[in-house]
Amino acid sequence: MPLQSVNDFVIRFANVNGSGSASANELFARAVLRMGVPVAPRNIFPSNIQGLPTWYEVRISEAGHLGARGGTDLMVAMNPQTWDKDVAAIEPGGYLLYDSTKPLPKSKFRDDINVIGVPPTAITNSTYTDPRQRQLFKNIIYLGALSALLDIDPKVIEQLIAEQYKGKERLLSSNVHALHLGRDYTLKNLKCPIGLRVQKSDKVGDRIFIEGNSAAALGAVYGGATVCAWYPITPSSSLADAFTGHCKRLRHDAETKKAKYAIVQGEDELASIGIVIGAAWNGARAFTATSGPGVSLMQEFIGLAYFAEIPAVIMDVQRAGPSTGMPTRTQQCDIISAAYASHGDTKHVLLFPEDPAEAFDMAAQAFDLADRLQTPIFLMLDLDIGMNHRLCLPLKWDDAKQYDRGKIMTAAMLESGVDFGRYLDVDGDGITYRTYPGTHPTKGSFFTRGTSRDRYAKYTEEGPAYQDNMQRLLRKFETAKDLVPRPLQANAEKPTKYGVIYFGSTSPAMDEAIAMIEAKGQYLDRLRVRAFPFHSSVASFIADHDFVFIVEQNRDAQLRSLIVNECSIDPVRLVPILHYDGTPITARFIARSIGEHLDALKVTPLRKVVS
Amino acid sequence: MTYVVKPKFRHPELPKNKFGYTHRDYEGAVSTLCAGCGHDSITASIIEACFELSIEPHRVAKISGIGCSSKTPTYFLGNSHGFNSVHGRMPSVLTGANLANRDLIYLGVSGDGDSASIGFGQFAHAMRRGVNMVYIVENNGVYGLTKGQFSATADRGSKSKRGVVNSDSAIDMVGIALQIGASFVARSFSGDKKQLVPLIKAAIEHNGAAFIDVISPCVAFNNHAGSTKSFDYVREHNEAVNFLDVMTGRPPIHVDYAPGTVEMVEQHDGTVLALRKLDAEYDVHDRLAAMSFLQHHADQGQIVTGLLYVERDAEDLHGHLNTVAAPLNALSEKELCPGTAVLDKINASLR
Ligand SMILES: Cc1ncc(C[n+]2csc(CCOP(=O)(O)OP(=O)(O)O)c2C)c(N)n1
Ligand code: SF4
Ligand SMILES: [Mg+2]
């Protein structure tokens, strides 16, 4: 029985990297969005496998589920190298769209799927002579075929093409022509539509479609970052690229055309973080974008910034480690290495955005926090939200907002005779005043160093002075708990002894999983942690429940360790739910794993489990 | 150990410079280095150069790495902000600081271990980016602070205090600086204040990456017979190609040099360098010739000192990046934040 579904299915495009498929695929996703149906696309691009395969998966979900679902209902198989695997991945009753120009033996197919042959190669060969055109338009022909098969309004795609090629009439009309070549062939030769269909709806609203890296970069622009230093590494490079692009458009002086920013591609991550620290020491808002291996290289400098109390923003777009690991796969695996980065006793502030909209907010906020707390701030993105377009709330800004530059002692304050001690805690919040270099001819200068010093920044190796300073740094970290974004709690419809804690890109899968779990009559209160250090509500949430599941995308239950360690909580009550194969976590996985635990807990009296 | 603060007593007749500062105003805490350490002489030269140039001390940012040499910024310009960063990474920290505020003078102080070993890469990249700075390497051929191991600038065949002969070939930082595009390159000797002070002054006035390799004997670990960085060895093998006089803000009318032996070099800010040539053939604007001259003399065991290269129309990193004239750290939300109207448009383009 062929799969039947309206506005709820997964389509996967299997492409050859560099074949120009990316823009056609994105066009497909946008067309569905324009029909008012939410989509969640994901790029899957192995780092180094023969045949240069890339996949683009689009989940179409009227219900608005934006997490990965798993499984493929319709495979658009355009890469001969991955054919066997792609065909095998289709759900029973699903569909396979393939290039039927060359006949394939029956053994290449499956009996339990629906095979749809369209010959884009034959069509392009008879229409175009230029090999590049043949390649590019093949993708559009597929799109045309899909519009017929899935009942997508071709006008919507034409409109998108028109927007894309505004002012380039020839490209515009040739793309529209190719679209109809594919569509007309399909309508004429095949039964349309198939069991999977897209129907106009109104579930998108005013939401926008943007990659997390681009949103975070825009957050940096809005947050006043003027210096960016970085070293290329997947999946963070597109963040620095996006910052460059945004700055070119938004940050040049209208009259002089000069840049109100400086971007340096460092020679490595050490230089990048060094530049950030130097700039921030000197009063500019500065950040770097990197991934796990880069954070590893930055360790010594991060300790300096912590100890010398220099603001620095580090955007870590996480990928699967350790080492080069799976560089093009997603994980949340740098939690511990970021939270405790560097040698000696250190702790750092981490922010966990769930999607691009929050990445924008938190990126901007990171600069306020860095200046206020005078310490490194990590924005913990991951490949899943960083490098994929995600439907999210429109980006918001308040024009009345002023940057919080933190405790800066000015020349006037120095002149008025206040007692300036760079490490003197006058307010009791652990945060001390700093001066920018060059503030005053005779007052307020100090020496910044990674060695211990007293409250007036004088070098000292006296134990009590050292401890005094280390204790103050802890006080400052306490202050941070109330400054960072609070966790968000959502309670189940019925009172329950069970809770779940999750963070970052797990969000959409978690939302969907909750519905599945509740459908089985099980209830869970949820807490989405948005920052480290943990607000007191994290500990009280755990105290309020017998068992709390901690869902994360790494092997070692890193957030759980951090909670156990920082909130002094008995680990037995924290049940790890771990997904770490490099694919984004799915609702099915969460619902199944938590469901199994809940079933087990139901049959075993609580006392037994604990003892 | 804590630093001793110098008494603030001022002699009323201490000479004052243009801004009314005395020599004292350019000093820092009392040095804790070994008595006789070459680095202290460099400190004295830096103080002298800043005094003579009438620089306002607080308009200087002093940044260093880690090492005896990197400690010296505590000993000069006590009213300047300083940053003793991490080992080998002064160049990146300074680059960032410079990007944040192009209006200050950046003085980078480093050692040969700091810059030729652990920080070799950062040294190279700061030079090739043209960061507007004075980069001083206090070069003693050893790691002073960690007690005398050979550094990467130790000459092959030179002998350690314990009698071990160095078998690795040396990195000549001047050669590297020339090769990778530093726009001002000089070498001097900590014991030759007359040569060093004007070189530092010229380097400060230079707009771009100015590198000075200063041979600076370590009396504790590298001043014995068999060392090629000892006071005696350097004095014997010093081959100065020129001497400088730096004239700020006024044309060089009265110059008492024999005709033909002096070249006037104008810097971008109007400062004029009067270059007294000791080697009539040596051309300070010829990068290639400088490189071969240096190699040639190094082969003969000679240490070439003086202003070795200066680019006439050097441009710095801010020039390359086309940044605004105002310091980036002085820009407010008004200049930096595009605001909601723009954001609404961006949102609209993402639907
Ligand atoms: C990452 C790191 N590794 C090693 C050290 C130890 N260390 C301190 S100073 C130094 C060498 C300094 O040599 P140089 O730069 O030549 O300075 P000098 O003391 O000779 O002036 C070393 C290896 C350190 N501080 N940091
Ligand atoms: S050990 Fe050498 S470099 Fe260090 S202070 Fe003593 S003489 Fe100077
Ligand atoms: Mg040394």
Image (cartoon, coloured by chain):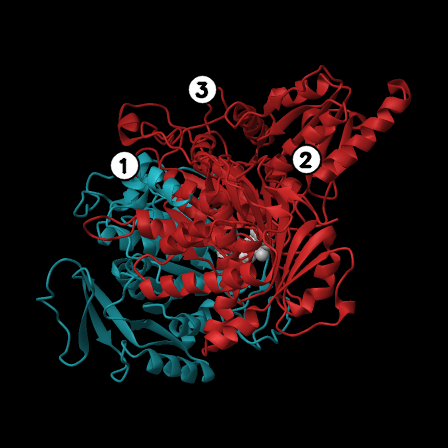
Chain colours: A red, B cyan
In this view of the protein, which residue sits in the foreground, A15 or B202? A15
Residue wearing tag 3: A427
- Residue placed furthest toward the top: A495
> Residue type at mark 1?
Lys
Q: Is A458 situated left or right of A297 in this image?
A: left
In this view of the protein, which residue sits in the foreground, A419 or A496? A496
Decide which of tag 2 and tag 3 comes sooner along the chain: 3
Name the disc covering residue B334, or none.
Answer: 1
In this view of the protein, which residue sits in the foreground, A399 or A1? A1
> Residue type at mark 2?
Leu
Is residue A212 at least partly visible in the picture? yes
In this view of the protein, which residue sits in the foreground, A4 or A388? A4
Q: Looking at the picture, how far across and down is residue B74, in whole percent?
A: 42, 45
Q: Secondary structure at mark 3?
A: loop
Q: CA distance from mark 2 to mark 3?
A: 32 Å
Q: Secondary structure at mark 2?
A: helix
For the point 35% across and 42% down, the residue is: B78
For the point 89% across and 18% down, the residue is: A607
Q: Is A227 situated left or right of A16 in this image?
A: left
Q: Secondary structure at mark 1?
A: helix
